[in-house]
Amino acid sequence: MDIFRIKGPVRLSGSVTINSSKNASLPIMAASILAPGKSTLQLAPYLSDISVFSELLSQLGCQITRNNNGDINIDTSVIDTPVGEYEVVRRMRAGICILGPLLARCRTAQVSMPGGCAIGDRPVDIHLRGLRELGAKIHIENGYITAEAPHGLTGKEIFLGGPFGSTVLGTANILMAATLAKGKTLIESAACEPEIADLVNCLNKMGAKITGIGSPRLTIEGVQELHPFTYKVIPDRIEAGTFMVAAAITAGELQLKNCRLNDMMAIVDKLRNIGVIVEPANNGCIVARKKPIKTSDVTTQPYPGFPTDLQAQFMALLSLAEGNSIIIEKVFPDRFMHVAELNRMAANLRKEGPTVIISGVKKLIAAPVMASDLRASAALVLAALAAEGTTTIQRVYHIDRGYEKIEEKLNPLGAKITREKT
Ligand code: EPU
């Protein structure tokens, strides 16, 4: 297992290019199942989640190859084993989003129940409710979901809201299943995340008939068949947000290329309010901090609200604000494994239910810490860049799931990160 050794504090400066979005790529890889033939995901990021998803598709019978330029070719001509195995899905919950497309194409599918993870209990009840509404018979046995629709799926009006609002992968699943259903499906309370809008764009390019893109009401006119795609997904707004925080926490200045500020209004608004400069610049932006960090209160919400996937990184940043800040987590109320680790680095954080009260400190101090999940580990890297001394972070495989060689991106900007094998 690799560890990071990070020497701080540093002030970052320079230019960095943001990758294609992980969370847009995964459902779009699943969408390839809907159209027998050869699809290409252009310039896909080199992330372990992408490799695990490729493994999942291979187990179904698909042929996956990767070009030197990063393009992933997925040949879905043959799908002879419509089963998402526990061994793969337990490593990456996004595996659940093969369920809808497999059911639509093969009329039968078996996918392991994903189970919980470090960010909390993550049920899939809404996914299953939506598929049942489309006519699937579903039962759960031995930890596997079996879904069957021997005569195909039928369009329906479906309300997809849940106790925490919309569901991103739930929307992806139902949306993909509905593209090949008989008749019209209306999804109310659909997720509005840019990654879902990107999936809709890709599905429409494949021949689907979906309207309402980017809104909570999606209408899908079922079609008989879809065609394979060649598609380049949107830039990763969470990677971009993480680099924005990196500029801010180190009082540095970074130019982000391949970044869509339009997808990041809530993030940019918070950064500007705490004294960080964010200016659009060709195909991206410049982010800089020249003044002390002001306090803030942040509530995570489904898009267009502030994303839960940047909550941990903002907590690291607000740890250094002049005064008290509050973060309320309304998407995954237990997503706080980083709190204790940041406190080990001399932050002053107090968790009260789904809320963390942050008393700003003058400096963070290096410590040995443990990564617990993808975004929590990003927060630890950010804190370590600003902390005095050498921080060691264990279990960095978590960060490799969603950030492509983060140390190779940060070091040319002034970071001092080494990756070591233990
Ligand atoms: N929920 C239910 N029932 C369901 C589905 C979801 O109650 O059937 C609840 C969840 O427990 C949560 C809320 O609804 O409280 C929202 O969860 P959602 O389904 O939207 O999450 P997801 O689709 O499983 C995706 C991202 C996550 C991101 C969330 C929220 C991918 C591959 N994953 O997960 O990304 O945090 O949306 O925006 O797109 C990450 O990249 O680090 C990550 C965890």
Image (tube, rainbow, N blue to C red):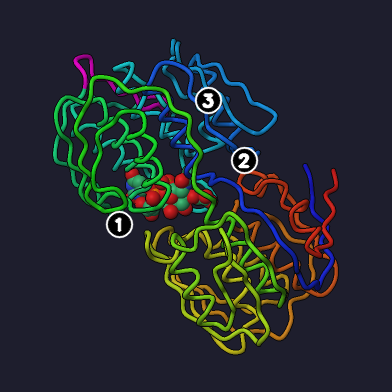
Which residue range is magenta in the image?
141-152
Label 2 vs 3, first from the N-terminus? 2
Q: Residue furthest bottom?
A: 323
In the rendered image, which quarter contains the N terminus?
top right
Residues packed near mark 2 inside 10 Å, few (<14), some (14 to 19) or many (20 plus)? many
Q: Amino acid at mark 1?
A: Gly
- Tell me how far mark 1 sits from mark 3, CA to CA: 28 Å
Query: For mark 3, what is the residue?
Result: 56
Residue 221 lies left or right of residue 18; in this view the side is left
Picture quadrant of residue 253: bottom right
**Which mark is nearer the camera, 2 or 3?**
2
Horizontal relation, residue 228 to residue 128: left or right: right
| Residue 120 in view here | no
Q: Is residue 73 above or below residue 150?
A: below
What's the amino acid at mark 2? Answer: Pro
Q: Earlier in the sequence, mark 1 or mark 3?
A: 3
Q: Secondary structure at mark 3?
A: helix
Residue 228 occupies which quadrant of the picture?
top left
Residue at left offset 61%, top offset 48%: 19
Residue at the image position 62 percent from the left and 69 percent from the top: 286
* Residue 45 image label: 2
Q: Nearer the viewer, mark 2 or mark 1?
A: 2
> Badge 3: few (under 14), some or many (20 or more) residues near its Cα, within 10 Å?
many
Above or below, 110 relative to 312:
above
Vertical comparison of 198 with 119: above or below: above
Which sits earlier in the primary sequence, circle 2 or circle 1? 2
Q: Secondary structure at mark 2?
A: loop
